[in-house]
Image (spheres, rainbow, N blue to C red):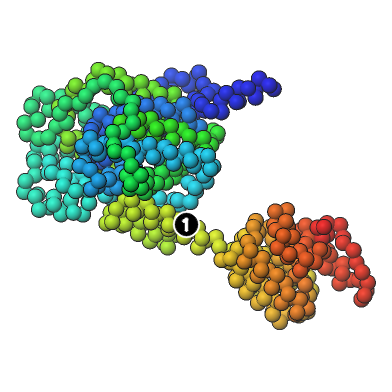
Amino acid sequence: MAQDSQRQAFRLPVFQGILPVDRSGLGRDILAGFTLAALAIPGTMGYTKIIGTPVITGLYTILIPMSLFAIFGSSRHLSVGADSATAAVVAAGLAGMAVRGSSEWLALCSLLALMAAALMFAARLLRLGFLADFLSRTVLTGFLTGVGVQVALLEVSGLLGLPRITNEPLEQIGHDLRLIGETNLYAVCVSLAVLVVIIGGRKISEKIPGGLIAVVAAIGVSWAMNLGAHLETLGAVPSGLPTLALPHVEWSWALIQKLLPIAFACFVVILAQSAATSRAYAAKYSDRFDENVDMVGLGMANLGAGLSGTFIVNGSPTNTAMVDSGGGRSQVSQLTASGIVLLVLLFLTGPLAHLPTAVLSAIVFLVAVRMVDVKGMRRIFVEARAEFWVALLTAATVVVIGVEQGIILAMVLSLLDHVRRGYRGTNAIIAADKRKKGWQTVPLGEPQQIAPGLLIYLFGHSLYYANAAQFAEEVLRLAKDKAQPPLAWLCVEAAAIGDVDFSAAAMLRDTCTLLKQQGIRLVLANVSPLVRDQFDRYGITEVLGLDAIYGSVHAVVTAYEHQSAAPAGATTGPTGGGPLA
């Protein structure tokens, strides 16, 4: 047992996504790593167009950040690297703070990665992994759809060989329409060829690396036909490994304050998207998964990104699906992909100079189109019409106003939706079911006494300031019901009440007093120990009486029937399972 605990302690901080190594599946994991590298290399180069950094920085995101998450994260499946959503947030947030593509711009991107890492570490210390649950699937669908539309619109200029003048999609599209007569036919032909190769390859098999084939073919054709004389190419791409250093910026508190909202927006996207992806694949394969440990892994990945001169990384649903479809079941696949990128950086960056930028525009355009979740939006529209308008508003905000504002709106709408759904409990009456000789719930509008003179009120939420008035209103309305015989006891089934705040406690005392004035006794059933302690602290137990809190509805019914059957003036003690002392 001691050896097991030592082994578990060793596994806790690192290699949770790798250990125990499945030797029978090791070859499959390595092969999936080759697939990931083949598909992710052109994709990450494309993301550099979104964020406005040198193409080599896309490869850097696969090198150190992906390896660090593989070591420090808990998920065996999550693939961490460049991501279009966070790239779009950064590009939109930094607009106007530096010249896009300059060394200062890249330094700010790296600084944002360090700030995102700091937020991840702080969130881990505070155990804030649960925050990922507060960005609802509805608004996340709308947000990512909006990002997809925004990125796709911005890449139209690259597909046509027109200059990119802004990060505002509607303004850029207007500019493209005005200059449509200056379209570069070479760029259009290259873009169409890339789209055909990638889409055609995917139609045949999801495992065909259409992006890599398109990149390699485009480099070869560009070199052979000297396409650089007719359209824009990447130009010289530096080889070698990144230098580990802090970003070269003029550090100041004012700069940190400017960047903090952007970093926080990225932090929220990373937390929600990574946790959702990890949770889905952990459930699929019945693997362990710890959101708080993953935050350490994501923090280390962004720390590595910031120090290696690249940009923010995120858990990528697309790359994770690539690994899964390739048979990968552990972070060995991600480490393999990192090793392949290492070889590319050392020996194969030279040919990239001939790559037309239209190729990357086409790749990014397809990525963006895949982010537009038409099927998801349609399903929301059919199943939850009100939530559809929330998702659509979020998407429209991203496109029209900006990504940063879109994620803030998404957070606010998620919380409002949670409050709207949760603060008014689903309340009912527990009544006798004569057909099944048991109990059933009936609507509040049809109050049925479970025994002559006894009504059981089921309250479906914690009691706090927002729903205290609802509780009092419903209880007093039930007390005024003209049913016969007149109500003697009103029991609150309190199993769902997990907390009572100061305002609700004051309301509960007042309600008890009003019921007493009407000759009705208020009792409670299924009160948790925590809530019982709160009742004692707030003085509610004293107002109700020590014998007014029961362990179950059955105990309440038994006690009531026992008292009703007792001769007038007789004292009855608690029955088995009766009041809780």
- In the picture of the structure, the residue carrying the numbered disc 1 is 415
Q: Residue at x 21, y 41 (%)?
A: 100
Q: Quadrant of residue 332?
A: top left
Quarter holding residue 109: top left
Helix, strand or loop at disc 1? Answer: helix
Let me know if residue 9 appears in the view. Answer: yes
Q: Residue at x 82, y 64 (%)?
A: 547
Where does the image place residue 568, in percent across and percent down from the top left? 92, 76
Q: Let me know if residue 262 appears in the view.
A: no
Say which quarter of the image contains residue 536.
Answer: bottom right
Residue located at (72% from left, 56% from top): 533
Residue neighbourhood size for the residue with mark 1, other residues' Cα within 10 Å, grouped as few (<14), some (14–19), many (≥20): some
Apparent side of residue 499 relative to residue 241 in the rendered image (left or right): right
Residue type at the position of mark 1 = Leu
> Which percent across, then down, holds residue 573?
90, 63
Q: Is residue 308 above or below residue 120?
A: above
